[in-house]
C-alpha cells in the first residue's frame, strides 16, 4: 500500500496498516454520506408529488426504488463496504 512508516527497530520503511485502514474507512464514510445525500435529493421532489397526489405511476416507482436504495446505503458497513446498485432512471 501507499502508507508507510519508519520502523526504528529494523531501520526500514514498513506498511502502515492502521493508517491505510483508517483512510479506507474515512473514504467509505465519505462515500456513504455522499450517496445518502444524492438519494435524498432524488427523493425530495418525488415525495412532493406523492404527498400531493400528483405522482405518476413512473414517479411512484422511482420514489420506492430511491427510498429502498437509501435504506440499503444506510445499512452499509463502512468497515467492509458493499455498495448497492443505484436505481435505474425509469
Image: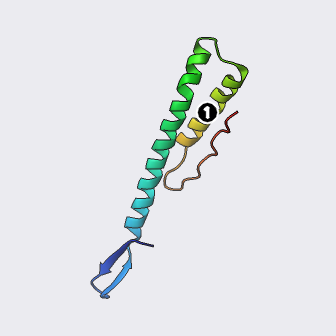
Q: Residue at x 43, y 48 (%)?
A: 30
Q: Nearer the viewer, residue 30 or 7?
A: 30
Q: Residue at x 35, y 82 (%)?
A: 13
Q: Position of residue 38 (x, y in %)?
A: 51, 37
Q: Residue at x 62, y 42 (%)?
A: 86
Q: Residue furthest left?
A: 8
Query: Where, quadrant-wise, is the N terminus in this rendering?
Result: bottom left
In the rendered image, the vertical position of residue 77 relative to residue 21, given as above or below: above
* Residue 67, image quadrant: top right
Query: Where, quadrant-wise, is the C terminus in this rendering?
Result: top right
User: Relative to residue 74, is residue 59 drawn left or right?
Assistant: right
Q: Position of residue 8 (x, y in %)?
A: 27, 83
* Residue 58, image quadrant: top right
Q: Residue at x 65, y 33 (%)?
A: 65
Q: Residue furthest front?
A: 89
Q: Nearer the viewer, residue 27 or 89?
A: 89
Q: Position of residue 88 (x, y in %)?
A: 68, 39
Helix, strand, or loop for circle 1? helix
| Colouring scheme, one of rainbow, by chain, secondary structure, one colour | rainbow
Q: Residue furthest right?
A: 57
Q: Residue furthest top?
A: 52
Q: Position of residue 64 (x, y in %)?
A: 65, 28
User: Relative to residue 15, is residue 11 drawn left or right?
Assistant: left
**Residue tagged 1:** 66
In the rendered image, the vertical position of residue 26 relative to residue 63, given as above or below: below
* Residue 61, image quadrant: top right
In the rendered image, the vertical position of residue 17 relative to residue 38, given as above or below: below
Mark 1, Cα crowd under 10 Å, few <14 / some 14-19 / many 20+, is many
Total numbered labels: 1
Amino acid at each position: 500500500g501507499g502508507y508507510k512508516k519508519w520502523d526504528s527497530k529494523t531501520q526500514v520503511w514498513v506498511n502502515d496498516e492502521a493508517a491505510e485502514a483508517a483512510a479506507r474507512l474515512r473514504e467509505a464514510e465519505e462515500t456513504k454520506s455522499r450517496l445518502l445525500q444524492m438519494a435524498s435529493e432524488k427523493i425530495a421532489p418525488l415525495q412532493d408529488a406523492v404527498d400531493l397526489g400528483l405522482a405518476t405511476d413512473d414517479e411512484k416507482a422511482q420514489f420506492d426504488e430511491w427510498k429502498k436504495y437509501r435504506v440499503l446505503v444506510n445499512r452499509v458497513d463502512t468497515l467492509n463496504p458493499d455498495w448497492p446498485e443505484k436505481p435505474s432512471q425509469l
